[in-house]
Image: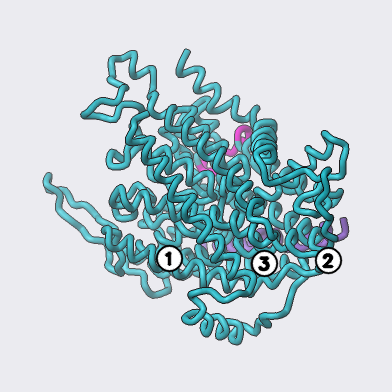
């Protein structure tokens, strides 16, 4: 590991710590209905939105009503995105004349689900499939809406702990509107202008055809990239305008944009930990969650960076220089951009999978087995290492419930968290969320590993589901496992190497995305509804403190143990066996 | 060809809508737990 590489990681961490409090404070004020510095400009727009949509700002909802609002919003979002994709050939803003045949029903289903669930898994190649209208009205709009829905749910879960003997968790439509107007729109606007200043394209031009030095014709895609790029990062969506995502120079042109994009991914999830502390009346509780996430984040970066810098011993045996020198980076540079290097590629891969972002600036499939295991394991934890916008916080809270439950079992005392008794219902709900997501990953991966299809069948034209893999053996299994981990985790990054654009994978990964989103957050909202109705217990000498290093250690241990116990057998068949084979 | 495409559209939309309906049933079940 180089000094410059380590310094970049430390600077990143320092900036993250610095922005956590102001971001968290702003969001706490916003969602508690207090005035912020953006109110003079945006409050009239907020009121107009409520008026047009018939929303009563002061009408509170029970957790079931809150969930019903979320589900109905998601159904209509899905239908809107689906229809727009299927009809793109008959709609304007389509300079490339993309028709309906490039967007078959299974792909439209997968893509609509993908953007509604904040996953942004892309079975399609944006520049050769989607019209500008679809990119903007379906995909970019969903980048805002699905991110805002995630934040709304997280805030409702926080209210579950903050409120005492309440039957309600807030109003979904109000939370959704505030998250979109005050949070995502301003951040995206500033982010898009910054990206434009660095060279990210933003236009409605048809593709440019250029003549190369050798005389060949090269098609250079154009489009409204910067506007999608900004919300893609801030909303931890990750779906790029181009197939190459943030490794494409039109999406991520300079090392500075690369660094800022990484900050954009974590700014809201990290800030939400402070918002949590502020809203429950003890900011130390928020810093404890921040601390646990930071420990896991730093550990992931170190393992990934070290593995990538160590390179491939099989190449070293052939005489390839794998140590960093003044003229080359050494290590494993396959699939990485030279302008970003190993350190920021490893950092980007860790951040994008800690959060549910899924943007990539290097090919995870080309990482070393251990380097690739880090993104895979990050998503397997449920993306609670800061996590996605909102989703990370409610995932962390789920693990906190489990951690205090385990601590309670160890000392023989009814567990409490933030003065609320953690009883049967909360633990049942936490387990339901964990079991549903783990089952989705493991069952879909297992079926895909063995299911036979006839060649040229509708569901999988290449034949058996494993015929879509580029690599055989352990690496091929990792490619398939990663697809379902990424789908269920609502991450959206691809290991690559798997041709997922067939009806089988479009359907199963689509279902995995739905399960990972809704069967995770519904139990959490149920637990929040139950907690909000409870009394707050007084702190006594027997109360387990949940703001100190002991709790942070317990929380980190719970996340690692649950993740490892659930997925160790699958990881053994993939990256672990590949690692030992490489070094044998 | 158009008929097949319409059938497939119906199938995939139905799958999604059924999932969301099942989510609502799951919500009610969680409420009763």
Q: Which mark is residue A188?
A: 1
> Is residue A522 a member of the stretch shown in magenta?
no
Chain in cyan (letter): A
The reply, left or right, for residue A505 in relation to residue B32 is left
Which secondary structure lies at badge 3?
Answer: helix
The residue under label 3 is A70
The image shows residue B16 at horizontal and vertical percentages of 65, 60
Which secondary structure lies at badge 1?
Answer: helix
Residue drawn at x 76%, y 59% is A528
Q: Can residue B23 be spotted in the picture? A: no
Q: Mark 1 Cα within 10 Å, few/some/many (few <14, many 20+)? A: many
* Magenta span: A449-461
The image shows residue A558, relative to residue A575, as above or below, that is: below
Q: State how far apart marks 1 and 2 are (Cα).
A: 38 Å
- In front here: A77 or A430? A430
Residue drawn at x 49%, y 69% is A84
């Amino acid at each position: 590991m180089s000094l410059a590489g380590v310094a970049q990681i430390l600077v990143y961490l320092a900036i993250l710590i610095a922005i956590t409090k102001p971001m968290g404070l702003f969001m706490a004020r916003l969602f508690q209905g207090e005035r912020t510095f953006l109110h003079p400009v945006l409050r009239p727009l907020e009121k107009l939105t409520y008026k047009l949509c018939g929303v009563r700002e002061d009408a509170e909802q029970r957790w079931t009503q809150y969930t019903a609002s979320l589900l109905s919003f998601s159904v209509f979002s899905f239908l809107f995105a689906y229809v727009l994709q299927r009809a793109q050939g008959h709609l304007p803003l389509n300079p490339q004349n993309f028709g309906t045949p490039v967007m078959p029903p299974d792909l439209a289903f997968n893509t609509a689900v993908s953007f509604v669930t904040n996953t942004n898994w892309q079975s399609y190649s944006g520049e050769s499939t989607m019209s500008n209208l679809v990119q903007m009205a379906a995909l970019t709009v969903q980048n805002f809406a699905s991110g805002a829905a995630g934040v709304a749910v997280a805030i409702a879960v926080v209210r579950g702990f903050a409120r005492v003997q309440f039957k309600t968790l807030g109003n979904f439509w109000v939370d959704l509107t505030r998250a979109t107007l005050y949070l995502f729109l301003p951040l995206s606007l500033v982010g898009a202008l910054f990206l434009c200043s660095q060279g990210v394209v933003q236009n409605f031009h048809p593709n440019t055809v250029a003549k190369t030095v050798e005389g060949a014709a090269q098609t250079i895609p154009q489009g409204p990239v910067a506007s999608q790029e900004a919300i893609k990062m801030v909303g931890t969506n990750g779906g790029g305008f181009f197939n190459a995502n943030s490794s494409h120079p039109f999406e991520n042109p300079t090392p500075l944009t690369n660094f800022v994009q990484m900050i954009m991914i974590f700014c809201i999830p990290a800030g939400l930990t402070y918002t949590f502390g502020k809203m429950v009346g003890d900011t130390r509780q928020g810093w404890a969650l921040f601390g646990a996430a930071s420990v896991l984040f730093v550990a992931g970066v170190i393992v990934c960076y070290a593995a990538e810098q160590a390179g491939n011993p099989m190449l070293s045996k052939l005489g390839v220089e794998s140590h960093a020198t003044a003229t080359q980076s050494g290590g494993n540079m396959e699939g990485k951009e030279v302008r970003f290097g190993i350190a920021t590629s490893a950092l980007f891969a860790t951040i994008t999978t800690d959060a549910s972002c899924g943007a990539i600036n290097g090919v995870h499939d080309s990482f070393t087995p251990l380097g690739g295991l880090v993104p895979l394991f990050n998503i397997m934890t449920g993306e609670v290492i800061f996590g996605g916008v909102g989703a990370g916080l409610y995932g962390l809270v789920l693990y906190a419930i489990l951690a205090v439950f385990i601590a309670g079992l160890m000392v023989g005392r009814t567990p409490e968290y933030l003065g609320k008794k953690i009883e049967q219902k909360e633990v049942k709900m936490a387990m339901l969320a964990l079991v549903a997501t783990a089952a989705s990953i493991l069952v879909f991966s297992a079926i895909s590993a063995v299911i036979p299809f006839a060649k040229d069948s509708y569901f999988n034209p290449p034949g058996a589901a494993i015929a879509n893999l580029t690599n055989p053996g352990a690496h091929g299994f990792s490619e398939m496992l990663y697809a379902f981990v990424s789908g269920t985790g609502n991450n959206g990054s691809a290991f690559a190497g798997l041709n997922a654009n067939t009806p089988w994978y479009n359907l199963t990964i689509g279902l995995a995305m739905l399960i990972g989103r809704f069967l995770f957050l519904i139990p959490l909202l149920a637990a929040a509804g139950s907690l909000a109705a409870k009394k707050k217990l007084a702190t006594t000498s027997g109360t387990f403190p949940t703001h100190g290093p002991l709790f942070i250690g317990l929380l980190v241990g719970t996340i690692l143990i649950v993740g490892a116990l659930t997925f160790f057998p699958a990881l053994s068949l993939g990256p672990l066996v590949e690692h030992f084979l490489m070094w044998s | 060809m158009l008929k097949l495409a319409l059938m497939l559209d119906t199938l995939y939309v139905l799958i999604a809508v059924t999932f969301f309906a099942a989510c609502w049933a799951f919500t009610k079940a969680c409420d009763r737990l």
